[in-house]
Image (cartoon, grey):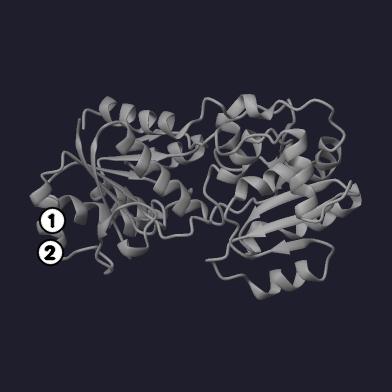
Amino acid sequence: MKRIAIVCEDISIPLDEGFKNASAHIAGSIAGLGHQVTVYTHEPDKAAIEAAPLPRNKLLRDKSFAAALRAERHDLLIYIPEAAATPMSMVRSSSLRSQAGGAPVVMISLQRRTYSGSGRILLRMTGPDLVLVLSSESLSTVRSAGRPARQIPLGVDPEVFSPAAASERHHLRRRYGIGDEKVILHVGHLRPGRNLELLEKLASSGARLALVTSSSTAADPCVRSMLESSSIHLLNEFVENIADAYRVADGYAFPTVSETDAIEIPLSVLEAMATNLPVVAMAFGGLPDILNPGGGLFLCETEDEFVTSAREMLKLETVQTREQVLSLSWRHVAESIMTGIEAERL
């Protein structure tokens, strides 16, 4: 058993955003392995799990925070920066190490970052003892910048996200006013970089498009206006049981291509697959590293392929996407994290 400090800058309720959701699950699953875990975050009174306060300044430095870290005598500090592995996050990692009395620091970077010449020099001079990333491309980028790195997956709870029985599905569709029409779902932010305009092209599939958006992240007014003027149905209130949204759908669409507008393994794709929905997604981030096309999963390289595949997924009679993600439990993620750390002898 290790004494571990986990620094998550934001795990506030509701967990309706990929960064917050993944961070909270990672912290909880590492504790579930039996380690003695203390979580530090901004606004701990609003945190999804028990947490202590984290300083809000750029370097996360504070005398009382440093005293708390040293008093706990942590064997390891895990930092999950909201901005991913930026040069500034690397500097913060060194700041955390010094405040923790020299305990090794592991950073988990949830988005891909690239580095300029000056950024690469800075990364060689400072940073965590290990960076854990979600894609083979990020792995190559961080290693070439001079930092030790390993690749890990993200996970899903297959008990929470599970297919509905026929009677339950019928009841849910009646509750949400859905008749016999096909429904394609997307869950995420209303941001320009999410490529949501591509969803408009799916209207030709004859399906009803439904978007469940984040209630805690401000929507871009232009994107909202564009979607509201289309035939896409928007739900921007917090959905307490998001699993029900997947259970009433007939397919899931993930059109995002921008590296800075989603975490590299979008949790919504894994959640849809755990519900055994057919899924059409751009070949984004770490998805091609952990998933294989087929059985109802379409990973697309172009927008034209995305639209064609969306039509095809609604015609499928047999779907087996759930089988691919059953091994990707959050416990498996925690074990992968700790195995990578132990392999580096930290």
Q: Residue shown at 65%/35% (left/top)?
A: 273
Q: Inspect this view and state whether residue 171 appears.
A: yes
Q: Residues within 10 Å of mark 1 (few under 14, many from 20)?
A: some
Question: Which one is in front, 214 or 246?
Answer: 246
Mark 1 belongs to which amino acid?
Answer: Ala
Residue 302 x %, y % = 75, 44
Q: Quadrant of residue 131?
A: top left
Tell me the quadrant of the picture where the N terminus can be found.
Answer: top left
Q: Residue shown at 41%/60% (left/top)?
A: 12
Residue 291 x %, y % = 61, 30
Question: Which one is in front, 238 or 27?
Answer: 238
Would residue 165 be found to the left or right of residue 334 on screen?
right
Q: Residue shown at 80%/51% (left/top)?
A: 174
Tell me the quadrant of the picture where the C terminus can be found.
Answer: top left
Residue 108 x %, y % = 37, 44
Task: Kindly state the secondary structure of the residue where label 2 is placed.
Answer: helix
Residue receiving disc 1? 68
Would residue 123 be found to the left or right of residue 319 on screen?
left
Q: Residues within 10 Å of mark 2 (few under 14, many from 20)?
A: few
Q: CA distance from mark 2 to mark 1?
A: 6 Å
The correct choice, above or below, for 9 with respect to 268 in the image is: below
Circle 2/circle 1 CB separation < 8 Å: yes
Q: Which mark is residue 64?
A: 2
Residue 199 x %, y % = 77, 55
Mark 2 belongs to which amino acid?
Answer: Ser
The correct choice, above or below, for 236 with respect to 203 in the image is: below
Task: Kindly state the secondary structure of the residue where label 1 is placed.
Answer: helix
